Image (tube, rainbow, N blue to C red):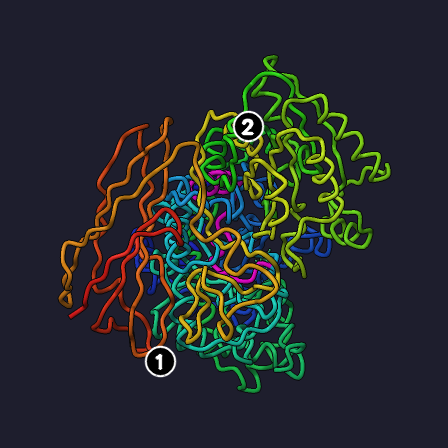
Amino acid sequence: MKKLCLLGLLVSLASQTALADTSAAAAHLKEKKAFVDHLLGQMTQDEKIGQLRLISIGPEMPREKIREEIAAGRIGGTFNSRTAPENRPMQDAAMRSRLKIPMFFAYDTIHGNRTIFPIGLGMASSWDMKAIATVGRTSAVEAAADSLDMTFAPMVDIARDPRWGRTSEGFGEDTYLTSKIGKVMVESFQGKSPAEHDSIMAIVKHFALYGAVEGGRDYNTVDMSLPKMYNDYLPPYRAAIDAGAGGVMVALNSINGVPATSNTWLMNDLLRKEWGFNGVTISDHGAIQELIRHGVARDGREAAKLAIKAGIDMSMNDTLYGEELPGLLKSGEVSQAELDQAVREVLGAKYDMGLFKDPYVRIGKPENDVPDYYADARLHRDAARDVARRGLVLLENRQQTLPLKKSGTIALVGPLADAPIDMMGSWAADGKPVHSVTVREGLRRAVGDKAKLVYAKGSNITGNQAMFDYLNFLNFDAPEIVNDPRPAAVLIDEAVKAARQSDVVVAVVGESRGMSHESSSRTTLEIPEVQRDLIKALKATGKPLVLVLMNGRPLSIGWEREQADAVLETWFSGTEGGNAIADVLFGDYNPSGKLPITFPRSVGQIPMYYNHMRIGRPFTPGKPGNYTSQYFEEANGPLYPFGYGLSYTEFSVSPLTLSSKTLKQGASLEASVTVKNTGKRDGETVVQLYVQDVAASMSRPVKELKNFQKIMLKAGEERVLTFRIGEDDLKFYNSQLKFAAEPGEFNVQVGLDSESVQQQSFELL
Ligand code: BGC
């Protein structure tokens, strides 16, 4: 099958180009540009427009109709169709089209494909690039084995307003950490090359600044200064592109008044010219049509015109390119060159994915189709468990409540203790809830018959009917959350009874996954009231209380942490989450996760992020005073700072030493600390390095993460850690957007979170 198709393609191309033989055609294939230009020369206008259409497979488009369209050369690729038996007939249809241009098949493989790994925030909490590479590689292997060529990931939108539901998908608030993770994700998705049979092409998203939507309300507008964009928000996209991401998905928001989808500055001046990007750009779902509602296009015709002129190559699930481009080309409002440029990028991406060489490179042969795509045996459970436990963050542990003993009686309560769908988090690709190990199941397996586990739900996710309806509206396949119809008081009573007969209570509380989802913005960061009532009742029993949090954004849990003896942040930890959580609760794994995002005390403090700009009247902890920048009704500063997370052991950090008090331009110096495991257990921690520019041509952040090392130390072991600081680490975009390090004093801080640090200074000459 493979050979025949390749031969067919070569023969057809060779005959049209008068190339004498297949070897000449094969040599021709090597030159992407020549190949693409040549193919473009053979295409009719309709075929070109067809390549720009990316269609979602769903009930609205019957498969037979799609195949006809493909065979007529009117579709370039699909998304949401995700197994070989589904995709092969479409590729067969493409092979029946006049030029046999292959289709590609895309999907949102974001944190796993069938095996679901922790959500973005969970991955980022590991600060472990090897673990993150495991996520990318495993996702690619699974997706490619299922016939997928492309993923709409990584999502590298910096999120500093946790009201935004999509905070869950990204890697937190920090530019440096997010850039590093974005790079690793791209490299691991794409492997040696996106043309490999077990690689998928990475489409970094959402370009740009989507995480900065005003008020954290999804799809809202973004207004931002250029230095802030260049210093804080753009670098992660750039890092993903420099790592070779094959494409860019353009954001749904506007930027300083111009929607990203019609933003020539964004896609042409910045992305193409300044950054030299030469991959494909894809609109977000229906975004071209939305230009009308943004108020920049009068009608569909104008919307299509604006999008293609600004640089959107492929239109995702939007009919306007197909409907309007013929007329726009005829009238000359869109030029042939503009159309050709977009088509060139699409063909180039297909070339890079190896599809011209073999359109079936990932679809494979029918005889190799697997009998059950959803078989458990196809999952990578060990990898998922390992990554999941690395991303769990221990927030509190009073009187060494944790780890728990595998003996006596443990009460397990809470609406998320046995919630398979929520384990997966949002954008869980082809993950199936039936494969999820819930906390209940994880604990059951861990204790075996050594301890008694008593379970009671204790409360529903929410007692608010409107919220319940909203959350269930989100899922078309199955109910997202199922309410226990009994009155709240009855549920609580049952949980209290379970608690009373137990030695310790583990309460799994927080958000259902739909609460931290696209379009699920919140006005509070609180755990819903029915769950807080449950916590209150549990506290009143006097039993040691462990809170296991599941959520996709920082929550303001000031009250909850006072009730609890221990708090473990688990985000949405994926298919193996329950086992990973049990590993940590019972001390079979020593937690090492650190927060990639600040936890505010209350929603009113937002935006709250560690690397905010310096100001003239800063609030100084311990020295309250009038006329300083503060809120007067509650304690200032975060509840938990960026980079924070406990372990079952203790670490000490020695005073910081610098190899020099001065740094010449182009040279580097070394910052060293001795880190010691002063506790009784082996453990890992993340040693973080921050830099502050003391006086620059413009105000600079109070500190910025510039490096970190995750290290394992045996009990009692100490190690000298050295960080190299070079001029590049000190550079920033000034108000003229000049990227340079400015001579003068810099503070260097090293510590185990962004607040408790050792400091030294040096001078850049
Ligand atoms: C989301 C994208 C996603 C796309 C395709 C959109 O609603 O904003 O992140 O890739 O759908 O599923």
Q: Quadrant of residue 653?
A: top left
136 magenta-colored: yes
Q: Is residue 260 left or right of residue 514?
A: left
User: In the displayed structure, would residue 295 be above or below residue 563?
Assistant: below
Q: Residues within 10 Å of mark 1 (few under 14, many from 20)?
A: some
Residue at image coords 52%, 25%? 586
Residue 508 appearing in the image = yes
Whether residue 230 sits left or right of residue 287 in the image: it is left
- Mark 1 vs ligand 1: CB below 8 Å: no
| Whole-percent x, y for residue 534 in the image | 73, 39
The residue nearer to you, when weighing 490 against 503, is 503
Q: Residue 436: x and y, percent?
A: 61, 33
Q: How many marks?
A: 2
Q: Residues within 10 Å of mark 2 (few under 14, many from 20)?
A: many
Mark 1–mark 2 Cα distance, whole angstroms, equals 50 Å
The residue at which mark 1 appears reads as: 735
SS type, badge 2: helix
Does 35 appear in magenta?
no
Q: Which residue is mark 2?
A: 582
Q: Residue type at mark 2: give it.
A: Ala
Q: Earlier in the sequence, mark 1 or mark 2?
A: 2
Quarter of the rendering containing residue 650: top left
Look at the picture and state if 139 lies above or below 613.
Answer: above
Depth order, front residue of 347/13: 347
In this rendering, the answer to whether 168 lies above or below 268 is above
The residue range painted magenta reads 135-162
Q: Which of 311 and 91 lies nearest the eye of the viewer?
A: 311
Position of 765 with respect to 538 (left or right) is: left
- From where the camera sits, is residue 16 visible? no
Q: Position of residue 734 (x, y in %)?
A: 33, 77
